[in-house]
Image (tube, helix red, strand yellow):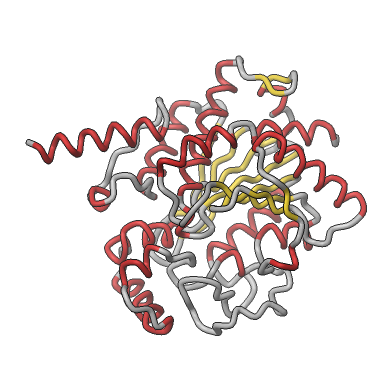
Amino acid sequence: MKKKMSFFLVYIIVFQLTGSHFVSALGANEASQPSAYSYVNMAEDITRLVERYPQWVRKDCIGQTIDGRNIYHLVIGSPNASDHVLVFASIHAREYITTQLVMKQTEAFLEELTSGQGYYNGKTYQQLLENTAIHVVPMLNPDGVALSQFGLEGIKKSSTRQGIYRIYEMDGAVELEPYLRKWKSNAEGVDINRNFDALWEQYDDHLGHPSADHFKGNAIGDTMEAHSLILLTEKYQFRRTISYHAQGEVIYWYFSQKNELLKESKEFAEAISNVTGYPLDGNYEQLDPAGYKDWAIMKKAIPSLTIEVGRGEVPLDVQQLQGIYERNRDVWAATLDTLTKNR
């Protein structure tokens, strides 16, 4: 009886943190770590959102991972809109709190659209979304997230588990459980955010083999996850992109862009800094290159941001979620507002 009561109390806590309308069922694997918002929880919530707001949102899949998980893609607004914006999360496995943040943002934005009560900078949410669609990829790296949250038990295929164990041996790690919890790469041991065509050739990951962190891959875009995001970007020619990471409470926005792209990028970054309170950091030469934001700016001329949320050791404690959400509540509206000023 005590065990059942404890589980019930934990469920209530998760319900409160996830949002008043978001109820995520806990799967069998998740029972051991009920505070982790998993791929299963996300997939169920995506289904609920599409059922609840069919006039505003649709879903599809832009790829499937090596361990058999869908990379889900939501479109809010018309896919035929003239302008498109991308928001994505969990490119790094251990930063999975960003998926929960983006799902909360998605639900809140849909509620504001439906109620007609939402305003930002004197514009309704419907006005902000005119001629624009928001594309959401809430968990780009679902295999890595499952591995960080649940260890090898979170991996479906024996072949994938064997590959991960070989990477563990190559990395020379000692204790398996804490090593997997800190996992950053995909299930193939590639850091997806080092797998894009932005100084990839010059980047020395100091590894040369699959790893829990930093390995850039054997070729540009050779992961399903990066390849899927590249194709999505090329299809919709995004006007703005936001990549959510953890941690640091800072916004990275610069990758040596010039002229009008520099001006538009700075205006976008300042608008998001104003609503989040996060400072801007333009010192890109001190950071590893070959990230999505870097590629989007360098090769596609898209004003793009990496937003680092939260403080402390990753994976971040779920208790930070509500504070993170409050600081990022108006990010989508502010992003759309910058587009209306540049039309």
Q: In this view, which residue lies farthest toward the right? A: 259
Please tell me which residue is depicted at 69% across the width and 19% down the height of the picture.
124
Compared with residue 191, is residue 60 higher up or lower down, i.e. above or below? above
Q: Nearer the viewer, residue 2 or 213?
A: 2
Where's residue 217, x and y in %? Answer: 57, 76
* Image mark count: 0
Is residue 78 in view?
Answer: no
Q: Quadrant of the C terminus?
A: top right
Where's residue 257, x and y in %? Answer: 84, 58
Q: Nearer the viewer, residue 202 or 321?
A: 321
Compared with residue 37, is residue 64 higher up or lower down, i.e. above or below? below
Please tell me which residue is depicted at 50% across the width and 71% down the height of the picture.
213
Where's residue 223, x and y in %? Answer: 54, 69
Compared with residue 301, is residue 79 higher up or lower down, i.e. above or below? above
Quadrant for residue 201, please give it.
Answer: bottom right
Where's residue 296, x and y in %? Answer: 73, 57
Compared with residue 308, is residue 181 higher up or lower down, i.e. above or below? below
Q: Quadrant of the N terminus?
A: top left
147 to the left or right of 56: left
Please tell me which residue is depicted at 43% across the width and 29% down the height of the picture.
51
Please tell me which residue is depicted at 49% across the width and 51% down the height of the picture.
139
Quadrant for residue 193, please give it.
Answer: bottom right
195 to the left or right of 64: right
Is residue 129 in view?
Answer: yes
